[in-house]
Amino acid sequence: MAKPVQKRSIGIKPDRSAKAFQDFLLGAKLYWGSKIYRALYEEYQEKITHRAGEPTTFKETEEMMKGSLYSFFGWLERHIQRLKYSDPSYGIIAIANRQRDELLRVLDEIQPNKHLRLNPSIEFPRYYKAVDFHQHPGGVSGDELAGFVYEYARKTTVPHFVHEDDLHFRLAKAVPKGDYKRILDFGCGVGKSTYPFKDLYPDAEVHGCDISAPCLKVAHLRAVESGREIFYSQQNMEKTDYPDEYFDLVHTTFIQHEFPLHALEKITREAYRILKPGGLYVNLDFHSAPGGMFGKFCYFGHSKRNNEVFMRVFHEFDYIKLLKEIGFSEASMLAFDDGTGWVSEQEVPKNWRFPWQLFISRK
Amino acid sequence: MKEQVFFQDDAIDRLMGVITVLASEVYILRDRLKAIETLLEERGFLTLEEIEKCPSGLESLERDRFIERLFDPILQRSSSKVEKDFQID
């Protein structure tokens, strides 16, 4: 297993006050995701006893839940995240701006090479430019420092009480073992899911592609710092320049829910094209929220409150059917333990969590 | 783009913004105060009088930034966007 040869050199470094502010928000988020979430569930249970049955749609549930507790629940979900990025003094973007010169110097030193292919003339799809997903102003390509910002922001995106990197190692371990010669992290962002695969399969040629150059630069920087040889390239997942049947394993990590269906179909076809016959396509994503209507209600609400506009569409979409139509011989959806324990389909999680699912398909 | 509204009276949304920022500022001050107290206890060379007479304090720019952060939520301006044809209910 590759061992880091150098400590992480540079990144977002909040001063004492900004660190305390971000810690305050983390505390608020944990409180929101446990005590307020549980109180909301109690209220839901109370309300359905006064009706003929549970509501069946998100809108109906939202109507039933109207009241101050749901208002506070929604407000905190939206604004804790907003403040995390956008507070003008201590938000991550403000912190990054104070370090702008120092961070840009590091990025300027990173020149394209065989381990980092960049495409300055790449065209961004309309859906990518039009939505600031998870309330990241300008998105993960909108500013040269966006990769550093996203890298830091992830610390509080992932589930409660779980270390942010642990999830990616859990993914790598959950993928069936194989003699993988070439592996692709498809939509790799800042590379968090690329590294565990390189560690588990050190002899494999490991690639990562993403449309965001700022993210790829950070991914490349961390790979170099940790002594991992990884080949990153800037590409639109809908159409890449990888040859046909090039990879033994292609994997994605929470990105499917960010696409409109027309793009998802193109991306899935592209994954099929670049996979060898018998190769695996693995997606760790959100689908089929547990917890019955209450689970769906929280999840669908999250999609609006956090600017995740395609989340609901993917949740309702028969992705397995698409995989099979495209030609995958096997495709299945498995529950995934994010580190907080397994959750059965009808069970309401004790704390708020994403509805993790692992899709495993074979070409 | 206008910020989402969660309360029946959107004055509460705005007030929540004010209160949350104020609370965060108190939290930051508590963190800093704890650091100062710890250092004082360890080293013991700061006196209350010295703190009283210390000329260093918040600059007017810092004051204005604090006031802006505190009251900006009243303006309900979103800092992230979803363009009109991508908005969902």
Image (spheres, rainbow, N blue to C red):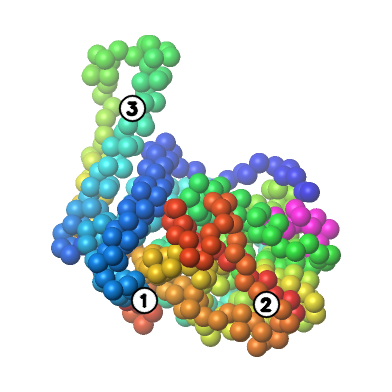
Q: Is residue A329 above or below residue A356?
A: below
Q: CA distance from mark 2 to mark 3?
A: 57 Å
* Marks 2 and 3 close (CB-CB < 8 Å): no
Which quadrant of the structure image shows residue A233? Answer: bottom right
Discs 3, 1: same chain: no
Q: Which label lies toward us, 3 or 1?
A: 1
In the image: residue A7, left or right of residue B80: right
Q: Nearer the viewer, residue B12 or A317?
A: A317
Mark 1 belongs to which amino acid?
A: Thr
Give the quadrant of the C terminus of chain B.
bottom left
Q: Start and end of the magenta stretch?
A: A194-205
Which quadrant of the structure image shows residue B44? Answer: top left
Mark 2 belongs to which amino acid?
A: Ala
Chain where mark 2 sits: A
Chain where mark 3 sits: B
Residue A75 is at least partly visible in this image: no
The spot of residue A33 in percent (x, y) is 40, 52
Which quadrant of the structure image shows residue A250? Answer: bottom right
Q: CA distance from mark 3 to mark 1?
A: 51 Å
Q: Which residue is mark 3?
A: B33
Residue at 71% over, 82% down: A328
Q: In the image, is residue A113 part of the stretch drawn in magenta? A: no
* Marks 3 and 1 close (CB-CB < 8 Å): no
- Label located before the other in sequence (2 or 1): 1
Q: Which label lies toward us, 2 or 1?
A: 1
Q: Residues within 10 Å of mark 2 (few under 14, many from 20)?
A: many
Discs 2, 1: same chain: yes
